[in-house]
Amino acid sequence: MDYIVIKCGGSIVDQLSPSFYKNVIELQEQKQVQPIIVHGGGPMISTRLKQMNVATRFVNGLRVTTKEVLDVVEMVLSGSVNKQMVRALLQQGGQAMGLSGIDGHLLHAKPITDTNKYGFVGEVEHVNVTFLKNIIAHDYIPIISPIAIGEQNQRYNINADLAAAAIAQALHANLCFISDIPGILVDKNGQKRPLHETTKKQIESLIASNIIYGGMIPKVQAALTALEQGAPCVAILDGMKTNSLTDFIAGKQVGTSIQLEEVSHVY
């Protein structure tokens, strides 16, 4: 079976149209490709933390996660955001199962190196592929929030891009980052145009020249890690564009496709 891991950023979850979820179901039912959705929820987390008067800050793009912050992160990600997406897929006739990385020890994590700086932020060490495949065997589409479990049952907040990459690595699956932009944008004759194909070398150059910056950096770094660990293909797609997922599976030129080796660049 072919798998595709679909990572939906928190900034786009509320904007995803019914056609997106129809495409996900179509992948499973007509294209014989099993989708697995991993989602973030950063803006919703920030809003809820503010409502609850819980201080929050970021270091190098990662949310510093104290125990108090972690409680809110888990509540938002594994609760409201996850179930919102499950309902949306059910409404289009699909079978969805919402879960977090804690359920069935799906995502086992260890703390990232500098715990004093970041708190309970982790990185995935192991994906319970057997558990995931058992869910898929019953025709469910997993929708996963990136909260993981570690030693002594410690919870960890995982960057959703990195969680999706870890799952893609474990399944040797294609990985799609669903965003609200048409891919990595570069200047072409005074206009911002999507870079349809790129490589590790070019991405490093674009980061150095500040063309790739902010939240796009961990995204492309996760893409490269997934490729290096066995994911066949990684793409950044525009979730606002109808049929972007099915067009990608069909081999059409959509979004930005990322590879390790040199390719001919098309603008």
Image (tube, rainbow, N blue to C red):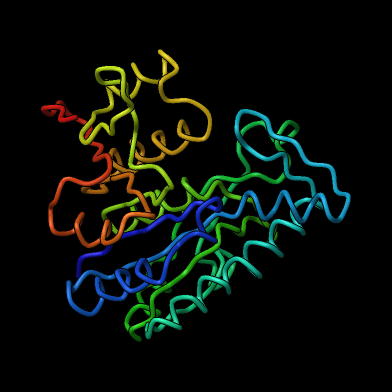
Instruction: Give the side of residue 33 with respect to residue 163, left or right.
Output: left
Residue at image coords 40%, 48%? 165
**Position in image of residue 157 (x %, y %):** 64, 51
**In terms of image quadrants, where is residue 220?**
top left
Viewer-proximal residue, 133 or 7? 7
Please give the count of numbered marks on the rendered protein.
0
Q: Name the residue at 60% across, 58% down.
A: 147
Picture quarter with the N terminus: bottom left
Q: Compared with residue 48, is residue 120 higher up or lower down, i.e. above or below?
A: above
Tell me where residue 163 appears, x and y as whole percent.
48, 51
Q: Residue furthest right?
A: 53
Check the image and report above or below for 134 versus 267. Answer: below
Of the 4 image quadrants, the one containing the C terminus is top left
Left or right, 162 with reference to 245? right
**Residue lying at 26% horizontally and 61% vertically, measured from the top left:** 243
Q: Quadrant of residue 266?
A: top left
Q: Position of residue 164 (x, y in %)?
A: 43, 53
Q: Is residue 22 left or right of residue 198?
A: right
Decide if residue 235 is on the left or right side of residue 11. left
Q: Nearer the viewer, residue 147 or 189?
A: 189
Seen as rendered, the residue at the extreme front is: 190
Residues 130 and 76: in front is 76
Q: Residue shown at 52%/79% (left/top)?
A: 87
For residue 181, above or below residue 80: above
From the top left corner, tell me how far across and down residue 40 is, in percent.
55, 54
